[in-house]
Image: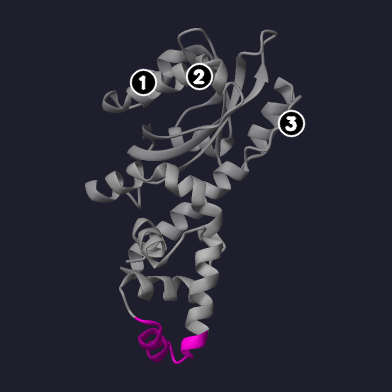
Amino acid sequence: MKEINNALDNLLLKIKESRDALNISATAKLDELKLICNESSELAAIYELDDYSFSMVDCSVNACAFLGIKKEEIHNLGFKYLLKIIHPENINAVYRFIRFYKDAANYTKTFSHTFYLKSVNGWEWTYASVKPAIFKEDGSVKYLLAVGCSINDFLSTKNQFKSFKNNLTFYEEHLHKYLSMTAREKEILKLISQEYTSVEIAEKLSISPYTVDTHRKNLIEKLNVKSSIGLAKYALLFNLV
């Protein structure tokens, strides 16, 4: 269980780093966008959105290495290249992405999804966040910056993948809260979710019941839940139990 918790912690940190990399000026130009992309240590890429397709304009050194492609090849292949590297069973993610940014309500929103991509090491699950960066005169999306990371090591079983995918929105919305928790808070949260009383937790951790109750109260406030039941649900979704 400890190994699973550590793997999830590492995965969530990767997701946070990827999303933090989407630091784009509202008035960015394509040259500036390419600079951001090329300086990124993440799997970063720029996409140009067309009416019913999109193509890769540029990508970071790490992205090229991950995909096993040279930058010169990107421009020649266009949308066909994306169809080539995305697994047929995951191709719906491509069209979901296109439909998402064809909706005016989503022009400024970030799109996050899991993609099954063909890398130099074979097929790998990756998590990517995509954010519009440059717009057309009518306000629709022209260029987007995507930043991702491989999550293949964590999703080694069907159950792990199903759990991650089903709870992806929850992870994203609550990630900052989870990362703000101390090791002791996670330890106490785990014991609370296992239905130990404050006295029992205090005995296990060699602290006072008052200290446990203080942690419990702080956790309820920090995680914005209403009771110990909410804490237990949070612990379950973040694989603490």
Gap between marks 2 and 3, in whole Å? 28 Å
Magenta part of the chain: 197-210
Q: Counting other residues with Cα less than 10 Å from the Cα at mark 2, is it few (<14), some (14-19), or many (20 or more)?
A: few
- Dot 2 corresponds to which residue? 73
- Whether residue 41 is visible to the viewer of this picture, yes or no, is no
What secondary structure characterizes most of the magenta part?
Answer: helix
Q: Few, some or many C-alpha atoms within 10 Å of disc 3 (few <14, some 14-19, many ≥20)? A: few
Q: Which mark is residue 158?
A: none
- Name the spot of residue 233 as percent of width and height, x first: 36, 59
Residue 212 spot, x, y in % from top left: 48, 82
* x 40%, y 46%: residue: 151
Q: Is residue 62 found inside the magenta-colored segment of the image?
A: no
Can you say which quadrant of the picture contains the C terminus? bottom left
Q: Find numbered disc 2 in the image and state the secondary structure of the residue it sits on.
A: helix
Single out the mark in the foreground, 1 or 3: 3
Q: Position of residue 83 (x, y in %)?
A: 37, 19
- Residue 89 falls left or right of residue 179: left
Q: How many marks?
A: 3
Q: Distance between the Cα atoms at labels 1 and 2?
A: 13 Å
Task: Check if residue 199 falls in the magenta segment.
Answer: yes
Q: Which residue is mark 1?
A: 84
